[in-house]
Image (cartoon, rainbow, N blue to C red):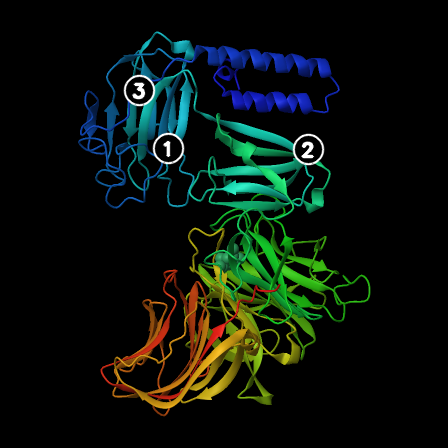
């Protein structure tokens, strides 16, 4: 940074810099002292000046006043926030701003200020939108030539509508006449410009790289996060080596929540936190503290924390990964952003459970190898025969395959029950265009199989590779028509242990039944079958589950938790079976029996007829329920449950289940519909006719809505049996 910019730095920054210099283990203390003195003098000089800002334009008027507009992009005057068809514009001040989205993205124009005299050392402004120099920009024009320019950041998927501070150092131009020109010349695709609050100032509001040094002395580093704040690139280094690096929407002010970085591996070390850019006056790094507990309200007691669906203590989750049972523990690894509420920074989070109901979150299992080389989805197995030679000690190792986005399909192994993982030194083991390796042991051929999502010749496939040792893999075959996150396993047919069918599905859950000989999948039918509906994606089943039970967990995609320090949940673990139906053999999913351990107070009704308006006597109050119902319409066109104000409806005419606009087809059997409904704080899951269909729906009931009632429309319903259980929290008494 040139020295003439330094005089405009906020004293907090200088104090921080001086602090760093004073605390550096410098071998040249005299130099450090001189540097500190220089910084102190500069700070004093800058702040002695202290002149008021001169506002050039705040765009609060009805029109642009003396500013001249050409073209159509800027409209007749300042925009009042977001324009029709535009994503939400944020970060401007007051009501109005310059917004060149008038007429959409293809409109062009310029907006030029009247001349003014440069009387301060800096010109600051809020700016958002396209990062297209010369096309979507703001220019400072002196003597007819642009002498400074800036663009929006365009740093978010779909384009950035958020305005942030930028500024120019114009000290050398003081006394000159100038004008400001805002330009949108861009056509063809996203790109416009948002500007507000242009002012002359003695304080440059630009962004600069920021640093802070500390000694790791507690378990967690608390990082303030504000969702929607500009994404910063943060790193943590020790002795010049980058240890962690990620994107973070760093709060500069009150955070939405505190994320954490686990300092356990770095205890006692001197660490440097680096952020690529922060406003000069930012206090964000000062807000970072350390502590032995996660910062914020006690974890799992938050108002909307699901009580029996897995959510991460902090941050985002998506796909379940590495589902494997080993020595009394069901492992749940998962796609995880530990530092934000949205997708990003993919790690493998980790939790374990003795019963698929009570989970304990453990430290992160897989960190990205480096920024940009993320740990995407994959699976895990127990290598009982130590085919890979990874075993150390008496127990067989766990072996996982995951996609390293920078390298390909990679193998890692663990000899401490999944707590720590080591990379196979010859990674990647498979290189191709694709991701999400699913490992399985194929007993008849006594080989490992990897089913992996594969992109080739503009098509989407599942490719099958085989290996004797989990290290060297041979391509065998591929089948098209599947997208992301494959799973492949055999199920016994209708409970007959001697007959098995193979199931193949990918992220959307739609499956093919068929045969798999260890190299090729031969489907029984052309069309796929569907069991899951609603918020459900990227499911996986457990390897090595006791008793051969096939347990599936999915990602409840799109189930959001606004205002909470976490986002997205897993669906309830389900047992998969293959049963005969009038339409043929179909996979069924039912919540694992262990869920019954959460049952509390029960109300039961049998053999009674309910008329419209009757409701249920003694409706149960609460926020967590399990309902088991065996019902038959006796004139009713629709019936169901009002769950905390959210209707769960069975429609007799449409023969479908419906909740919050999500539906699943379900035909009555002998005139009867059997339902199992699980109600948690963020979701309702409905299983129809013994799990022939499953519907997962994200819901956000009002906090004061706590009753459950039954209803019927246009006629009666025969209740053969109805049990309603209040469920207990799985987090209690952990
Ligand atoms: C599916 C998916 C996977 C990928 C992962 C990244 O949801 O896109 O294909 O590995 O998420 O988080």
> Can you tell which quarter of the image residue 648 is in?
bottom left
Residue 239 screen position, x and y as percent: 71, 33
- Spatial separation of the CA atoms under disc 1 and disc 2: 34 Å
- Spatial separation of the CA atoms under disc 3 and disc 1: 26 Å
Q: Nearer the viewer, residue 659 or 702?
A: 702
Q: Nearer the viewer, residue 28 or 18?
A: 18
Look at the numbered disc 1 and give the secondary structure of its residue.
Answer: loop
> Between tags 3 and 2, which lies in front?
3
Q: Earlier in the sequence, mark 1 or mark 2?
A: 1
**Which numbered circle lies on residue 132?**
1
CB atoms of marks 3 and 1 within 8 Å: no
Quick check: can you spot residue 87? yes
**Which numbered circle lies on residue 55?**
3
* Side of 189 relative to 75 (left or right): right
Q: Measured along the vertical axis of the image, is residue 415 above or below residue 295?
A: below
Look at the numbered disc 2 and give the secondary structure of its residue.
Answer: loop
Name which residue lies at 57% across and 69% down: 357
Find the residue positioned furthest to the front. 618
Residue 372 screen position, x and y as percent: 56, 45
């Amino acid at each position: 940074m040139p020295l003439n910019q330094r005089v405009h730095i906020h004293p907090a920054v200088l104090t921080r810099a001086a602090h760093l210099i004073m605390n550096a283990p410098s071998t040249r203390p005299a130099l450090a002292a001189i540097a500190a003195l220089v910084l102190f003098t500069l700070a004093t000089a800058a702040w002695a000046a202290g002149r008021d800002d001169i506002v050039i334009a705040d765009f609060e008027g009805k029109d642009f006043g003396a500013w001249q507009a050409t073209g159509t992009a800027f409209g007749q005057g300042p925009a009042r926030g977001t324009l029709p068809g535009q994503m939400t514009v944020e970060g401007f001040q007051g009501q109005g701003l310059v917004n060149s989205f008038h007429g959409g993205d293809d409109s062009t124009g310029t907006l030029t200020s009247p001349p003014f005299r440069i009387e301060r050392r800096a010109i600051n402004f809020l700016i958002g939108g396209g990062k297209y120099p010369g096309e979507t920009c703001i220019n400072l024009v002196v003597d007819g030539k642009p002498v400074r320019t800036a663009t929006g950041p365009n740093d978010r998927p779909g384009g950035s509508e958020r305005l942030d501070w930028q500024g120019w150092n114009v000290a050398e131009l003081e006394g000159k006449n100038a004008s400001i020109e805002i330009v949108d010349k861009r056509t063809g695709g996203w790109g416009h410009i948002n500007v507000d609050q242009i002012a002359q100032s003695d304080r440059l509001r630009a962004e600069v790289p920021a640093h802070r040094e500390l000694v790791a002395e507690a378990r967690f580093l608390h990082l303030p996060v504000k969702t929607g704040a500009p994404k910063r690139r943060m790193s943590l280094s020790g002795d010049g080596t980058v240890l962690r690096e990620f994107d973070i929407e760093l709060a500069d002010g009150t955070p939405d929540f505190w994320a954490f970085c686990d300092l356990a591996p770095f205890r006692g070390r001197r660490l440097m936190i680096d952020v690529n850019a922060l406003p000069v006056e930012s206090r964000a790094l000062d807000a970072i503290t350390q502590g032995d507990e996660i910062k914020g309200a006690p974890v799992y007691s938050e108002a909307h924390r699901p009580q029996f669906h897995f959510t991460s203590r902090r941050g985002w989750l998506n796909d379940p990964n590495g589902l494997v049972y080993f020595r009394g523990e069901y492992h749940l690894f998962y796609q995880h952003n530990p530092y934000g509420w949205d997708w990003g920074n993919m790690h493998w989070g980790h939790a374990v459970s003795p019963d698929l109901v009570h989970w304990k979150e453990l430290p992160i299992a897989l960190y990205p190898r480096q920024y940009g080389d993320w740990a995407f989805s994959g699976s895990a197995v127990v290598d009982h025969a130590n085919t890979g030679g990874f075993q150390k000690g008496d127990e067989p190792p766990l072996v996982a395959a995951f996609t390293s986005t920078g390298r390909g399909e990679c193998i890692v192994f663990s000899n401490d029950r999944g707590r720590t993982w080591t990379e196979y030194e010859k990674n990647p083991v498979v290189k191709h265009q694709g991701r999400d390796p699913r490992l399985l042991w194929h007993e008849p051929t006594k080989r490992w199989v990897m089913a992996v999502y594969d992109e080739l010749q503009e098509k989407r496939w599942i490719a099958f590779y085989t290996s004797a040792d989990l290290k060297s893999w041979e391509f065998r075959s591929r089948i098209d028509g599947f997208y992301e996150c494959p799973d492949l396993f055999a199920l016994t047919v209708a409970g007959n242990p001697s007959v098995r069918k193979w199931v193949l599905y990918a992220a959307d859950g739609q499956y093919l039944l068929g045969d798999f000989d260890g190299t090729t999948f031969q489907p029984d039918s052309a069309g796929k079958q569907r069991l899951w509906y609603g918020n459900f994606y990227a499911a996986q089943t457990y390897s090595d589950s006791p008793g051969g039970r096939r347990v599936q967990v999915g990602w409840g995609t799109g189930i959001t938790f606004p205002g909470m320090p976490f986002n997205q949940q897993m669906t309830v673990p389900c047992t998969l079976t293959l049963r005969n139906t009038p339409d043929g053999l179909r996979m069924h999913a039912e919540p694992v029996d262990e869920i019954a351990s959460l049952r509390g107070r029960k109300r039961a009704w049998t053999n009674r007829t309910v008329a419209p308006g009757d409701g249920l006597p003694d409706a149960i109050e609460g926020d967590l329920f399990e309902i088991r119902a065996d019902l038959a319409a006796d004139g009713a066109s629709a019936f169901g449950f009002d769950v905390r104000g959210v209707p769960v409806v069975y429609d007799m005419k449409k023969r479908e289940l419906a909740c919050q606009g999500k539906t699943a087809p379900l035909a009555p059997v002998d005139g009867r519909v059997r339902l199992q409904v699980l109600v948690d704080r963020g979701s309702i899951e409905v299983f129809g006719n013994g799990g022939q269909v499953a519907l997962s729906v994200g819901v956000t009931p009002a906090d004061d809505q706590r009753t459950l009632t039954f209803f019927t429309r246009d006629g009666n319903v025969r209740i053969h049996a109805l049990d309603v259980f209040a469920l207990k929290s799985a987090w209690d008494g952990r």
